[in-house]
Amino acid sequence: MVTLEDVARHAGVSLATASRVLNGSARQVGAGLRAKVEQAAAELGYRTNVAAQTLARGAGNVIGLVVHDLVDPYFAAIADGAVRAAEAHGMVVMVGTTHRDPAKEIAYVSSLGAQRARAVILAGSRTDDPSAAGLRAELDRYRNGGGRVAVIGQDLLGTDTVAVANRSGAAALAEALTAMGHRHFAILAGPPRLITAVDRCEGFAAALPGPAPQIIHGPFDRDGGHTAAHSIGPDVTCVFAVNDVMAVGALAAFRERGIRVPEDVSLAGFDDIATLRDLVPALTTVRLPLADLGARAVELALADDDGPTVVHVEGEVVIRESVRAR
Amino acid sequence: MVTLEDVARHAGVSLATASRVLNGSARQVGAGLRAKVEQAAAELGYRTNVAAQTLARGAGNVIGLVVHDLVDPYFAAIADGAVRAAEAHGMVVMVGTTHRDPAKEIAYVSSLGAQRARAVILAGSRTDDPSAAGLRAELDRYRNGGGRVAVIGQDLLGTDTVAVANRSGAAALAEALTAMGHRHFAILAGPPRLITAVDRCEGFAAALPGPAPQIIHGPFDRDGGHTAAHSIGPDVTCVFAVNDVMAVGALAAFRERGIRVPEDVSLAGFDDIATLRDLVPALTTVRLPLADLGARAVELALADDDGPTVVHVEGEVVIRESVRAR
DNA sequence: GCATACTGGGAAATCGCTTTCCGGGAGGAT
DNA sequence: ATCCTCCCGGAAAGCGATTTCCCAGTATGC
């Protein structure tokens, strides 16, 4: 491999000069030498050794992104936004998938620390349970080492946060559905301790004027929605699934049992996943700018402010065919 | 940050010994010292500096994955498989997204070379055009630097390859559809120079006994399928979209125009995207083990064989409701 | 019993780059 | 003309590991 020293020798300059020319430095280099170095680098096919650079500089150009599951379009969209934003800053993204295992989340943060990653982005809300303490400790350690952390979801860890307005989004949805004449709701509420799920569920329920909704807990994925849908009571006219993927599961369950949407029951989700836009009936939902979430988290983590900054992102209610007025 | 030297001093041993204990080495260390080092590391909260390790060893623990678009569930599934496989080998994955820009693909390979990435995985077939020469050159350079390359798609670059049997999969589909009585086909064929698309299209067409199918080119994505579907001739009874996402676009187009699937026309796709399984009507398609594709590419790249190995992966025809017998 | 492995420990040389510090020459002010 | 700044080039000291030697101590072969 061609090293910087080779380039310097070939150009007849010192190592220092070559470094200053090729890998951005505050110091200027005269035009003549600069040209010579650049030409030498081109001729020799020089490529920076990032590991050496990271070691010498004490900070790398990696941004870590930790998600639950890349196949879930929610996270895929966030990852996409993060990769784009990182690229714009000349950084690269390393992704880790935890498949909802808190231990793996910790392991990734630790590994990213070892990589001297510039920042780590945590997407996907953690549950509220004690295992979060380990994560917290690992994150503190990482930050003490000079790393930046940004979280997508809710402001829990005292870090930079892209906070999603789950409560108010769900409330707005509830109001819209109420305005369309619905009074009897069921909520496919997801895990009882998953904060995102809880916020959406509570925000929705609190905005309802009528009788309390039926609340059915279960996993936060497609199959969770599918299973939960089987427990829906007879007088329910409108079902709210706390995410789109669960709504899809519910839709399948309804179809299997001959229940028509929206004729027999209305259905709404949350997120507005692009891949699901062509579903029939089109899903009423709360649109979240998912790619933006990822991108803004990167911006946040890269900005050198002091205190943790919290950015709030609102959802937007989108009424589509899956809901019918009563 | 705690360095290895701190640990060595704290444990009262030499740097060499500490290194041998903490970061796998061929040489043995006596049980007593070993324990002391491990304890010192734990007490101090030592974390390996990967950059320094990479520099000293001359090879890192990063695997680069280059895809077109993470939001496309096809690539998301591949990425998922790759991340899992990498993890099993103690490596981490860096993803780059090209959004179908060949220049970015080259840039990523270059950047991964600078990272001393252990391997790079290229997913998503390239077009057949001359710009591929630049990629080839960059890949050669990367390999000369000791990197390994694996490609998912077709065996074009003389590297390790996970080859997808697009032709035979499409042919099997064509036979199945023919057996169901269809004779007049249209193919939503994607870009005329995209090799994956061409292979599927030709494989399908070649297996047809009847009249030549109508071939409609267009982009390889949802909107491409949507647009292309408008040009389908009147006597076509069955439409083959060269991937599932295009099929979804076509389905939407049919629905807009009041054409029923499968009553008026049958429709089939390719890939069997999991996120799309709940579509109505369920899509007939050729199932590909997408996550496996990613995982096997990683295995291939990490195995230290000499010559390029080519693994062939077959698809499996899955008949669902979107096709009706004639 | 003596020469010959073999074992496990440590000192020190790398790995490739960044950056501080030093020094010489040019330009401006007095 | 002199002194003080700038400006820019180079020498060299790190950054934090790995790994090659070198060595002493012990085990082994005859």
Image (cartoon, coloured by chain):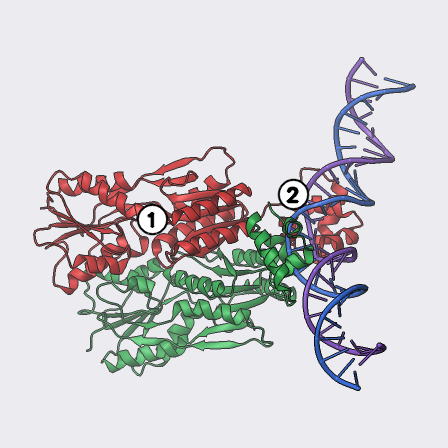
Chain colours: A green, B red, C blue, D purple
A269 relative to A165 in the view: left or right: left
SS assignment at label 2: loop
Q: Which residue is mark 2?
A: B24
Name the residue at 20% across, 69% down. A262
Same chain assignment for discs 1 and 2? yes
Percent coordinates x, y for residue B83 in the rendering:
47, 50
For label 1, count other residues whose C-alpha is less than 10 Å away and answer few (under 14), some (14-19) or many (20+): some
Above or below, A223 against B24 in this view is below
Return the residue nearer the eye: A166 or A53: A53
> Going 27% across and 78% down the picture, which residue do you hit?
A177
User: What quarter of the picture does the C terminus of chain A occupy?
Assistant: bottom left
Could you say which is closer to the camera, residue B231 or residue B290?
B231
Q: Is residue C3 above or below residue A17?
A: above
Asked where in the image residue A323 lies, by quadrant, the reply is bottom left
Q: Position of residue D30 (x, y in %)?
A: 80, 13
Instruction: Specify few, some or many for label 2: CA neighbours under 10 Å numbering under 14, 14-19, or 20 or more.
Output: few
